[in-house]
Amino acid sequence: MAERVRNMTEGSPVRLLVGFALPLMAGNVFQQLYTVVDTAVVGRGVGVGALAAIGAADWFNWMVLSVVQGFTQGFSILMAQYFGAKDERELSRSAGASVTITAVSAVVILAASQLLAAPVMRLLNTPEDIMGQAMLYLRIVFGGIPVIAAYNLLAAILRALGDSKTPLYAMIVASLVNVALDLLFVMGFHWGVAGAAIATVLAQVLSGLYCYRAVRKLTVLKIRREDLRPAREMVLHLLGLGSPVAMQNGIISVGGMVVQRVINRYGMLFIAGFTATNKLYGILEIAATSYGYAVTSYVGQNLGAKQIKRIRSGMRWATVIALATSAVIAVSMIFFGDRFLGLFIGADQAGAGESLGIAYHYLFIMSLCLPILYMLHIYRSALMGLGDTVVPMISGFAELVMRVGTALVLPMFMGQEGIFYAEVAAWTGAAVLLVSAYYVRMRRYRTA
């Protein structure tokens, strides 16, 4: 397996950003494939109740896993900067320290998630008729946290060095295996939501092993034994970058869980419809997250190389590309979204028509406002590449306030219709803050 590291301090910013993002998009397509298959197999093969159970667990599940991802994403910022500065020794030291911190945090998060799962699900007013299935799903997925942490760190190391293709290939392998195991465990063995959860964890094991093999072959990365026992200042530096990102994800999730609590008041059919659309949310966001990773690596490497003009040029192009992409996806979902939603809920099931109507209405509103989400990702990622993870964390508070405020207030005047606007309000509040903060921060480099 040849090295695929990429120096983003030279060459066309457009070519570099798109070339870096496209493999990530393809990888995310495959990741969403097995998310969609999980949901479709459970929803159509087990029933609307099982679909609602997974939906009720979604936000707490996302909170725990996104905290793990947040730490590793923060750690990759420092690695990208050292790689851009061509400082291989500090690159290796930061990677070794990241391994140690990730291992310790994975154990802590695993224990905490298992202890808190039942109290949190009760706090969210999860209906009793789906509580058992939701808890079973969470117990199994949370058991795979060490594996998920390992994959996220290894993929973060590769992306920091400009390699977006290896995580793509890892995700393709994992997705194909996950689809096969879903069909086997759920449809063949009739293991229900447990089968879907087991398939997801086993797929993550494969993707982690694939990335590990690639990292071991990197010649620019020479982690020594002493690098795994990092100095205090290195630990603090990495935690200073990773903790705000993890906290930002956690804060966003808290807002999502408050919304979930409101949604749970409206019963199983409403939960199932909301869940179906939330499973398509990943497809709406695929290009946004991919461009975001590209921007973080691009900005981080060019900051390390003191190429400030390239940062400005790259961000102009990233904005244009992101807005154009969001428009294409939005139009596609408005015209064809109902067909996608039909994958999750069989038309012959009781209450299917009501759930599908709820799902499409929610999808239509999010699609219209999709450019706002793309600006959020681009400018949050640019700030992170500049080494600022504090403002993105504060943007998480903005999302929390807007999401919770909208979910609690609008339904008082609009009924359940008001809940559909909580997500869009959260995007808007965060995007305004992040775009403003980016331009304020770039004034420091005016003379560059």
Image (tube, rainbow, N blue to C red):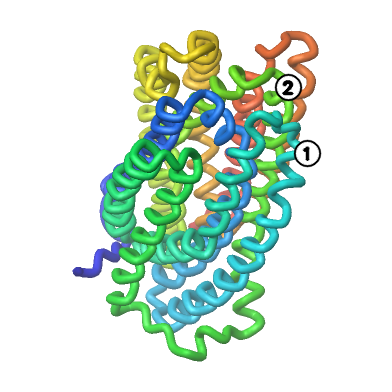
Amino acid type, label 1: Leu
Q: Nearer the viewer, residue 396 or 211?
A: 211
Residue highlighted by disc 1: 123
Residue highlighted by disc 2: 265
Looking at the picture, how far across and down is residue 215, in whole percent? 34, 71
Mark 2, secondary structure of its residue: helix
Q: Quadrant of residue 321?
A: top left
Looking at the picture, how far across and down is residue 366, in whole percent? 52, 22
Q: Nearer the viewer, residue 390 or 47?
A: 47
The answer to whether residue 313 is above or below residue 361 is: below
Q: Earlier in the sequence, mark 1 or mark 2?
A: 1
Q: Is residue 287 visible?
A: no
Q: Nearer the viewer, residue 398 or 101?
A: 101
Q: Residue at x 55, y 77 (%)?
A: 100
Amino acid type, label 2: Arg
Going by the image, does 392 lie left or right of 338?
Answer: right
Looking at the picture, how far across and down is residue 90, in whole percent? 47, 80
The answer to whether residue 158 is above or below residue 52 is: below
Q: Quadrant of residue 285?
A: top left
